[in-house]
Image: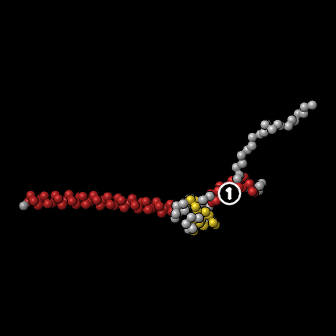
Amino acid sequence: MDSIWRKSSSNEKMARKKSKLKSTKRFGTRYGITGKLKFEKIEQKSRKKHKCPYCHYVKAKRTAAGIWECRKCKAKFAGDAYDLTKKSYTKRDEVKEKTSIAEDFEEIEAVEEDEETEEEKIIRITSQKKEEEKGD
């Protein structure tokens, strides 16, 4: 007698879902998926090896929050807490950068204006010399 519910054979397995969580599986059902995914990204960044700013080898590892050590040249240095390659900007840095660009632009304009006045001076001096020669 065939039952309504039949057992699946070995070749009729369902497709398995790929897990998004790797090292955060250790938390189990606690803390929620969103928090675990964010933590996963941060942990992957902090645990990988980064490029040393001194010897330029990919040997720098995080020893503590914000403290990095190169395994090749043994240099210890400070950086961001989780990622060494990320350059963090503050609003003050952006303002400083914009003002320095504006100052550089003003200096370039001032130099260009000075060059024009020098050219005018040369033209004026040569025309005065020509007039003196004609007068003599």
Q: Is residue 132 left or right of residue 8?
A: left
Q: Is residue 132 left or right of residue 64?
A: left
Q: Quadrant of the C terminus?
A: bottom left
* SS at badge 1: helix
Instruction: Choose top left, top right, bottom left or bottom right for residue 46.
Output: bottom right
- Which amino acid, by three-letter code, is at mark 1? Phe
Q: Nearer the viewer, residue 11 or 50?
A: 11
Q: Identify which residue is drawn at 90% across, 31% down.
A: 2
Q: Where residue 60 appears, x then y in whole percent?
A: 58, 62
Q: Identify which residue is drawn at 45% across, 62% down.
A: 99
Q: Where residue 20 appears, x then y in whole percent?
A: 70, 49
Q: Where residue 123 appears, x then y in whole percent?
A: 20, 57
Q: Where residue 66 appears, x then y in whole percent?
A: 60, 66
Q: Which residue is mark 1?
A: 39
Q: Identify which residue is drawn at 72% across, 55% down.
A: 24
| Scheme of image coloration | secondary structure
Q: Nearer the viewer, residue 101 or 36?
A: 36
Q: Is residue 13 left or right of residue 4?
A: left
